[in-house]
Amino acid sequence: MTAVVAVTMAVIRALVRLYPGRFRSRFQAEVLDSIRADIREASQRGAVATTAACARAFAETAGGLVAEHRGRLRLPRLALNDDLRDGWRSLRQSPTFTAVALVVLALGIGAGTAIFSIVDAVVLRALPFDQHDRIVAVLEHNAKRADGPTSTMPQIFLDWRDRRQSFALLAATNRQVMRARNLTGELENARCCASRASSSRCSASTRHSAGC
């Protein structure tokens, strides 16, 4: 503990030397004697009290140094502790407002996180294919039917594939909904969606599955 006191006094003497000359000439000896007396008195109460006295002396000396040079260096006055204390006191005096503010803050953070996740998954994150911006869907539309695109016959797809000029590859897909069977061969109520694709679909993508 003697070493701690010696180091603290050495640091404090170094800080005092940074004070303006007028302050050192008038108060240096008095300040150092007062700090020594406080630490000596604290040492009689144990190691914890001595450590606290050393820390308090260092903080006060450093704070005084900043205050002395604030005008010359134009340092901003920090009132963060006072602002936090006043804010906490106001929140304790208005528990209803505090609860509403916390709920609104939580909802805002949750909504912002959800929106960013959706935008990241849909817009920002690229598809798992090379040159995904060149992938398009070719659909067949029957003018006599108003229910949108219809299924394409296999022969029509083969004609498209053989006569293509604007596309490097053409692949056919077919989505199906199937019912699963258990180990005994009986149909289960569970349904699963699957897609069948032609071989060119696998060569166009970067993810190869076992069925390709």
Image: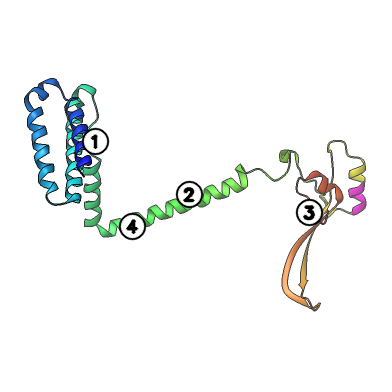
In front here: 11 or 154? 11
Image: magenta residue range: 154-158
Label 4 close to label 3 by CB (< 8 Å): no
Counting from the top left corner in percent of width and height, residue 20 is at 15, 22
Question: Residue 117 lies in magenta, yes or no?
Answer: no
Label 2 close to label 1 by CB (< 8 Å): no
Mark 4, residue position: 100
> Secondary structure under badge 4?
helix
- Residue type highlighted by circle 2: Gly
Residue 191's place in the image compared with 88, above or below, is below
> Secondary structure under badge 2?
helix
What residue is drawn where x is 48% and y is 52%? 111
Mark 3, residue position: 209
Mark 1, residue position: 78
Label 1 close to label 3 by CB (< 8 Å): no
- Residue type highlighted by circle 3: Ser
- Residue type highlighted by circle 1: Leu
Choose top left, top right, bottom left or bottom right for residue 160: top right
Q: Disc 4 versus disc 1: distance between alpha carbons?
A: 30 Å
Mark 2, residue position: 112
Between tags 3 and 2, which lies in front? 3
In front here: 145 or 152? 152
